[in-house]
Amino acid sequence: MSSDEFSKLVDKLNQQGKMSYIEGATEDQITQFEKDNDTVLPSKYREWLLYCDGGEFFLPAGVQMYGVAHKPIIDVKNDDRPDDKYIVIGALASGDPVLFEKSEEKICVYDHESGEIDEELIYDDFYAFLDDLYDLLGIGE
């Protein structure tokens, strides 16, 4: 994503609702997190972490994202997932976790009620997830 596209996405989020962005992580912090946890974060999520290392979107009740340098930190062993091939990177206000499958770019939501990944909530990458958050959360309905 170009810096212009990135800026447009951030502007769109800010126009849609109240956000609480946490200071971005450094490239070294992200790399160290991946090394320490023997994982590779999705590329678009990595880019986002440089801007915002976690935070809360669509306050007061939207989604909380986790970071690699600021609390809450991503817990790669978080049990709130369908199995250990997924890593939880955030949670919706409903409690359903936002995750990615290891070695994949796709971001998805695990539906606790059904006990499955919600097929309608699988996104090609982290930016596609962010771009759909307003609709996903049902804001303005």
Image (cartoon, rainbow, N blue to C red):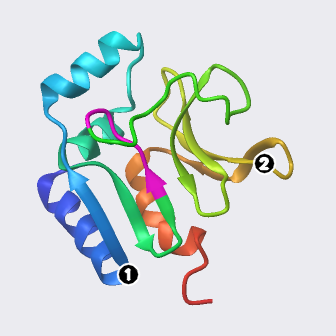
Name which residue lies at 25% across and 66% down: 10
Residue farthest to the right, as pictured: 114
Question: In the rendered structure, does residue 66 fall within the stretch colored magenta?
Answer: yes
The relative height of residue 23 versus residue 94 in the rendered view (above or below) is above
Classify residue 74 by image quadrant.
Answer: top left
Q: CA distance from mark 1 to mark 2?
A: 27 Å
What amino acid type is highlighted by mark number 2? His
In the rendered structure, are the residues bearing label 1 and label 2 in contact, judged by CB atoms less than 8 Å apart? Answer: no
Residue farthest to the front, as pictured: 71
Quadrant where the image shows the C terminus: bottom right
| Residue 8 image position (x, y, % from top left) | 22, 69
User: In the figure, is residue 7 to the left or right of 136?
Assistant: left
Q: Which residue is mark 1?
A: 16
User: In the image, which residues are magenta?
Assistant: 64-69
Question: In the rendered structure, does residue 54 fall within the stretch colored magenta?
Answer: no
Classify residue 121 by image quadrant.
Answer: bottom right
Q: Which residue is mark 2?
A: 112
What amino acid type is highlighted by mark number 1? Gln
SS at mark 2 in the image:
loop
Name which residue lies at 59% across and 68% down: 136
* Secondary structure mostly seen in the magenta stretch: loop
Label 2 crowding class (10 Å Cα cut-off): few <14, some 14-19, many 20+? some
